Image: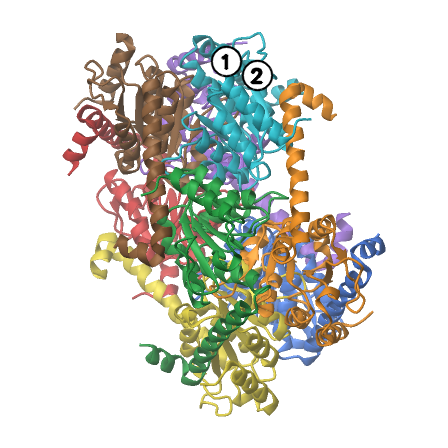
Chain colours: A purple, B blue, C yellow, D orange, E green, F red, G cyan, H brown
Amino acid sequence: MPSVTDLIDRLESDAAADRPDESTPDVGIIMGSDSDLDTMQGAFDALDALGFSEQTDHADPPEGRFSYESYVVSAHRTPDLMYAYAETAEDRGLEVVIAGAGGKSADLPNMTASIAFPLPVIGVPVQEKSVDSVIGMPTGAPITAVDAGKSYNAALSAAQILAREYPEVRDRLEELHDERREGVGDVSAALHDLGVRGFREREE
Amino acid sequence: MPSVTDLIDRLESDAAADRPDESTPDVGIIMGSDSDLDTMQGAFDALDALGFSEQTDHADPPEGRFSYESYVVSAHRTPDLMYAYAETAEDRGLEVVIAGAGGKSADLPNMTASIAFPLPVIGVPVQEKSVDSVIGMPTGAPITAVDAGKSYNAALSAAQILAREYPEVRDRLEELHDERREGVGDVSAALHDLGVRGFREREE
Amino acid sequence: MPSVTDLIDRLESDAAADRPDESTPDVGIIMGSDSDLDTMQGAFDALDALGFSEQTDHADPPEGRFSYESYVVSAHRTPDLMYAYAETAEDRGLEVVIAGAGGKSADLPNMTASIAFPLPVIGVPVQEKSVDSVIGMPTGAPITAVDAGKSYNAALSAAQILAREYPEVRDRLEELHDERREGVGDVSAALHDLGVRGFREREE
Amino acid sequence: MPSVTDLIDRLESDAAADRPDESTPDVGIIMGSDSDLDTMQGAFDALDALGFSEQTDHADPPEGRFSYESYVVSAHRTPDLMYAYAETAEDRGLEVVIAGAGGKSADLPNMTASIAFPLPVIGVPVQEKSVDSVIGMPTGAPITAVDAGKSYNAALSAAQILAREYPEVRDRLEELHDERREGVGDVSAALHDLGVRGFREREE
Amino acid sequence: MPSVTDLIDRLESDAAADRPDESTPDVGIIMGSDSDLDTMQGAFDALDALGFSEQTDHADPPEGRFSYESYVVSAHRTPDLMYAYAETAEDRGLEVVIAGAGGKSADLPNMTASIAFPLPVIGVPVQEKSVDSVIGMPTGAPITAVDAGKSYNAALSAAQILAREYPEVRDRLEELHDERREGVGDVSAALHDLGVRGFREREE
Amino acid sequence: MPSVTDLIDRLESDAAADRPDESTPDVGIIMGSDSDLDTMQGAFDALDALGFSEQTDHADPPEGRFSYESYVVSAHRTPDLMYAYAETAEDRGLEVVIAGAGGKSADLPNMTASIAFPLPVIGVPVQEKSVDSVIGMPTGAPITAVDAGKSYNAALSAAQILAREYPEVRDRLEELHDERREGVGDVSAALHDLGVRGFREREE
Amino acid sequence: MPSVTDLIDRLESDAAADRPDESTPDVGIIMGSDSDLDTMQGAFDALDALGFSEQTDHADPPEGRFSYESYVVSAHRTPDLMYAYAETAEDRGLEVVIAGAGGKSADLPNMTASIAFPLPVIGVPVQEKSVDSVIGMPTGAPITAVDAGKSYNAALSAAQILAREYPEVRDRLEELHDERREGVGDVSAALHDLGVRGFREREE
Amino acid sequence: MPSVTDLIDRLESDAAADRPDESTPDVGIIMGSDSDLDTMQGAFDALDALGFSEQTDHADPPEGRFSYESYVVSAHRTPDLMYAYAETAEDRGLEVVIAGAGGKSADLPNMTASIAFPLPVIGVPVQEKSVDSVIGMPTGAPITAVDAGKSYNAALSAAQILAREYPEVRDRLEELHDERREGVGDVSAALHDLGVRGFREREE
């Protein structure tokens, strides 16, 4: 296993490699602990649904045009790794970072946004009690945030940013949205037309 | 299954049909998601207890004089359906709408109240965290709300409005109230006269 | 000055007088203390804007068809007056009661709703800290509430109930609503077309 | 089963009977619903531990000098029963009332305190969310309260009031307190002298 | 000025003096800081209104039968003085203690209640943020509390305890209560009979 | 003044005009009321500092390449204007919308994000109590938000999105950031090197 | 079992024994109840990981240089034991005290800090609701606190104080920190290099 | 004025200079913004009261043995300066750091504690809303905190740490404490002996 220092070196050498935009991950997903993975799974699910691939080697891109990568980065246990990740993010080709953290001192999203600026960072409070800490940035130090646990939405928001440049991402967002909309329509008609009892029976 | 657009067309054609008051649903129950149904069940239970029927086809009323209908309407996933429902509500013959929504951005009751005005809308916060969002309307944009999860009470409140015009609804409300009152009396006498231990033994 | 006991007697004799609906107040406004009057003023303002008159003598109605009356009724300092007010409310010809109370134990709206049932009662929490106490009724004991301090909206909601029966109240609600809507339109066009600086200069 | 009206008549006839102090219950325990009984059980336990008896018939006292009685009294479903209970409490010989209620509109303790004044009433918020409603009385309308669910302490506080007059109650309070104190001492010495591991082993 | 140690000695010698009940203060009022005095003033006002005198010398009682005394006692800056006050309270002839403290660690009421047990202690949270700390006692360590800042009510509650033994205190409580009740009646009749505008004009 | 209906027509005709990207506003700033303008001023200030111009006529762009426009749009008083604004936003050439709203039911940002999807919308809670309502969107309906009142940061975040495509926006963001950073450096050195007293004297 | 009075005597005789620093416990761990032990276990775990021994007899030190001891001390049920523990703490050779308490009136840490001053006391709120009570000390009465339940961190903080004097404690803290840091590195590399799916498969 | 980069270089060269303990500052005080200075003033006041000097040049110590220094360090606007400060803190001779920050994302104390570990860091939440963010550290990443705004107490706590090694600091802490204690005694005796009215008159 690489040590933390090895990882920092790797990030810096990725950044120096100056790889073409098409071959680097577009979205970086980081989280403060692997115990946050269940909550952050939504981000992976959304990006998968939008047709993104996961890139597990910076030097060896997957086939699809759009990809994401993920790291565990702890603000309090590995501040140097956090610093290196944020500082190299733009040079490593990322277009947007999704950063999730739990607890009442959820510093990872904020510190990453401060260091990686002007790269956009979307904060995901992993717990309800993390919302204040993630959202509460002072004037001049921007972050945008989604609600507690809403990593799925964070990934949609990241894709909305990419969609300004890439029409295929925009199209895929619309398709996904329409599916969701028709899902509501189905259930709405069923509840009304079958009546509550009929609807409940059908659900069983 | 009808698409969302079909449902919107249907609501508009119901509104245009100009059916007689006796044949249209009196109470409209909407909720932001079918996952709210367990919480909203109280509204159905209360209306059933008051002798209301469920109307599942706007063109084909049930036998009883008083009826309700229900739809799933998502403010955030189907804003156009929400808009159409609220805009046609009064023309479709509804006298009062009960709107339930969960989450911290429980916009459905408020938006419905704003669009359907001056039809009375009673908001049901589906979760404790939905209360602020449902109740917090600005001056000039009224909604009334019940407490989190109290869909049963919302239905009683809806019936209280109808009772101003319809003595039979008023009578049924009083009967239901008296049953509840005597239920307290029974348990009160039992606790006192049997003593705590005796009462607990009886309960087992 | 009449004593509290005199007031109770008066309420009971009003109730017994069986006066015709047109000559009794339609909306009763009560508040826990005269220190709540500034907050409750909104209810008077809204009803005035809707063309309601104030009735100061139950035996001597004002000229207009629709009217309101007001009393100070303290749940904790005059529980017997509260009881009498709520118990006689419907017989005194009221169609809906607006009850405002402050503090963390804002019992007046809830107790009034419980005693006056099935007459609709709209609770106005006079302070933010009164919201929970006003809204938190148990299943089977309905109240509807507006947000803290929103007595203006409570009066609109009361009028929405009356509007189910009385088209002239409904019409007046729509007019008031349209005025408000056009007020937003004016300010929106001004902000856009003059630009922020121009708009601010105009406001000065 | 007696009806609610029967219960009210009974309370009034108890009050009129003018029975001697020794034969009437000293502590009245009321609660808003029998679903509060598990939380209110602590009051019964404490009074039992202090040697009080339960009196289940006002006309037929138990053997011991000190006794309590209990009723279910709902502020919102049986306001008239609540009113009658509070109004007759002192005449029925009670020295102090313990009133428990749940929900956010926990009006029973407050209304009882207001009506039964100057009899001392100790409020028990049955849920955490009931604390504000129970404690928040306006100036001039006193209640004292214990923390959420602390019905055991409410009973001790009731006994502390009785202990001002009755040395035997005071003595029993001290004995109970000493037992509790020595219980802490035992566990403290065990933790220290056995060490954490030893202590945990002993506990298993 | 006496030192803190002098004060402790004084309290102990007061306790040892074994003075007759009639000549010792009945109510002890303590507060964590003299900055709490404005909030605690209500307790003095209420006791004055009930005819109590202030006793400023334990050896030299004032003329009236009922009296109170007051000390500043800081749990965190003078824990030994707090301990001595609570430990000697009953022996010094007090019947009930009113203890006020501010801040989030309002320990004075709780510690006093724990040490002075079984003497009743009524806690007054001096600030809203002190409520939790004052009310939150564990099972077996009772305190009763009033709402934040409600020192006036704490004094009424103290008097309610004394009223169980002393009919003249009970009578004075009832008189005070009736005055307050009629005050509500006056304002209620004025608001109704003059109408809102007339009432406001009168108030100016 | 144009009526609300006129404004809706105007928005739709702007959208239909299909103007070139360079001549349409890049950032749309909307707010629920002109009383929100002081809080939203930060967004104007930040965009001004980044060299954006204000566009007050959709058909007549200002000189600079980057521009913003603003409207007052009330979700509850002008739901149709809100709907039209959100529905036409992308066709009117906007790249990102900043939507501010106050109160506890701050529905404007959420509804706008739902209707304008997939255009990115950044919500600005105008008051602390608006945060929950703005941020709390359900899965599948994304919004990103800044903290209460942080309209300045919302504008920076909007620019960060534009900076992905436009290097000149990115450069200007970096310059602004460096100024801020050196401002901290100046004050830090002054505090340290002058000492607290010296620093305070200099500030006076 | 020794009585509480025996324990107080023991503490005082320990303090008088004037044992050499090397033979007395360095860290005292106290908690309000043995029900707090599961939460306080973290402190024991951390000190064990740092090589501290548990001292179960003040007269008979364990082999290692650094040690801790523990007692159950209830502020509300054994105020005299609390007083004696705090007053003798420094004389008994403790360098720092870790005090944990639960409930909303978590007075033990604060009172101990006040009495044991100037010995450093680190407060551990055993429950979330204990945080305010533990942290909220007035000016001049210092305590430092960790977050709810973070007894492990409290022990690290205690060791950080000892580390100022004892380089071996400092070294052991660094080692423990490095282990934790490399743990993050391992999991970070695994998540990235295996991808989410691969990582999850490995975890199963 | 030195640039931020100059400051970082200065900190690193201070650290490399390896100056003797007696000549380096003992307490480092940092704050996120100079707008925090009024709140942090308490720390300076307490250290001044304890006889500490301010050191404004690392190479040129003041006369007294004990000293402090201060810097403004912004986690979000100068993350590199924060990193450098924390990383060099121990090598620059500091024994303890007091770090204050405001806002809901008060990251400075936490990040400093994480980077400077095992140097003790005491966090000062500059606002009430900063408490959660400062105190909420995860297991293994310790910080201790004082209550919002309690910078004075943070300095006392820092001195309590130093007092473990330096008896003169310990003595000065005791003197300061005694002054405070006697201040309470004076006011307590005055309130009691003069009575409330007399006391108030004296205060005027």
**Left or right relative to F18: residue D174:** right
**Left or right relative to B178: residue A118:** left
Quadrant position of residue H21: top left
Q: In the picture shown, does residue A98 fall above or below C34?
A: above
Q: Secondary structure at mark 1?
A: loop
Task: Kindly identify the amino acid type of the residue bearing the numbered disc 1.
Answer: Arg
Residue found at x 24% / y 57%: C199
Q: Where residue E131 sits in the image (x, y, percent)? A: 49, 49
What is the C-alpha distance between the residues marked 1 and 2? 9 Å
Residue found at x 32% / y 31%: H176
Quadrant position of residue D56: bottom right
Viewer can see residue A68: no
Residue under disc 1 on the same chain as residue under disc 2 = yes
Which quarter shows the N terminus of chain D? bottom right
Task: Kindly identify the amino acid type of the residue bearing the numbered disc 2.
Answer: His
Image label count: 2
Viewer can see residue A123: yes
Disc 1 to disc 2: CB gap under 8 Å: yes
Q: Where residue A70 sits in the image (x, y, percent)? A: 51, 23
Quadrant position of residue F2: bottom left
Q: Where residue G196 sits in the image (x, y, percent)? A: 59, 23
- Tell which subunit mark 2 falls on: G
Q: What numbered label is drawn on residue H34?
A: none
Q: Which residue is mark 1?
A: G19
Q: In the picture shown, does residue E82 fall above or below G122?
A: below
Q: Which residue is mark 2?
A: G58
